[in-house]
Amino acid sequence: MSATLLVLAAGLGTRFKGGIKQLTSVGYSGELLMEYSVYDAVQAGFDRAVFVIRKDIEQLFRDKIGNKISKYIKVEYCFQDINDLPCGFSCPDGRSKPWGTVHAVLSAKDLLTEPFLIINADDYYGKDSYRSIFDFLTSEKNSSAICMGGFVLENTLSPTGTVTRGICTANEQGFLSSVMETYKLSRSSDGKICGEKNGKSAEIDGSSIVSMNMWGCSRAVTVGLSECFRSFLERSSANGTMSTAEYALPSAFDELIRNGDISVKVLPTKDKWYGMTYMDDLPQVRAAFAEMVSAGKYPAELFKNKDLSHF
């Protein structure tokens, strides 16, 4: 059974003051962070990659990664356009930022003809989650089910600034009960992890499971996401936030769970996250990949050999 890797790569990365962060090299031989994600996904069994990008970076994107990986996985592209909205809505004058990750996924809905895994282009997730999610998605009993890679909060913090994470709660059967977007998370000088929840400061347990936008989905989920996105636009129009509001996947999945429309199996992982929220994250990320290459976890040059299975 086939499965698609859906890579969200259209974000502007406003906190990353150093060019286009999705196309910034981090690897031993100049690889992009998302190249490691594709490499891990190919090894896990994914045979198709769909990239959600901005139209203005299409040729640069093809040159930097698409043409390189197309020998190993089928590659397709779609474009996130802020004017691509449901009937009855229009983009307000002056808006330049994308509508968020729900809109990014919906930009690709016509290409999502099989089970798919959503990831961010600027996040490194580790190898284990790709294998467990691929196995989940391609299992006959899970053909219409949804899963989420569940990361440990303390493994997902940035040493250089604050981050936003979806703090998760799950029931005894391991199904997601709720996801709450929690902002400005960082570790304080006394070792505590603090952030903002519902507009108020809160201390968060470092062992909490968080969403890193790694969602394994059946094609049918796009129907629910479309309905959620329309409701979001209606709320934004009513409260006057159409010029700035964004709608994130954790919020949409939380809404669908609370409405009883979906169930989401949490697949825990202890893999360490690496990402580039800030330009100052770059040296640590590059050092981490150099260490992984040195330890034999990855080859010095990705996508050089025809056979990727031995790593």
Image: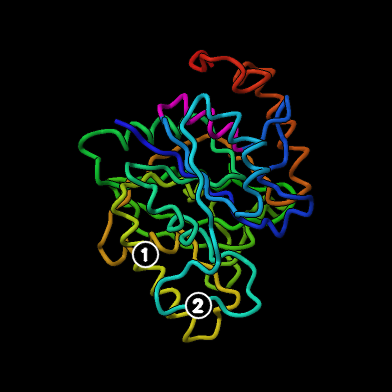
Residue 71: in magenta span:
no
Secondary element at tag 1: helix
- Quarter the N terminus occupies: top left
Question: In the rendered view, does 171 fall on the left or right side of 296?
Answer: left
**Where does residue 202 sit, x and y in percent of width and height?**
58, 65
Question: In the rendered view, does 117 fall on the left or right side of 303?
Answer: left
User: On residue 90, which mark appears?
Assistant: 2
Q: Residues within 10 Å of mark 1 (few under 14, many from 20)?
A: some
User: On residue 226, which mark appears?
Assistant: 1
Q: Residue at x 49, y 62 (%)?
A: 248
Magenta stretch: helix, strand or loop mostly: helix
Near-viewer residue (190 or 179): 179
Secondary element at tag 2: loop
Q: Nearer the viewer, mark 2 or mark 1?
A: 2
Question: Which residue type carries mark 1?
Answer: Ser
Q: Residue at x 74, y 44 (%)?
A: 281
**Number of numbered discs visible in the structure rendering:** 2
The stretch of residues the image draws in magenta is 34-45
Question: Which residue type carries mark 2?
Answer: Ser
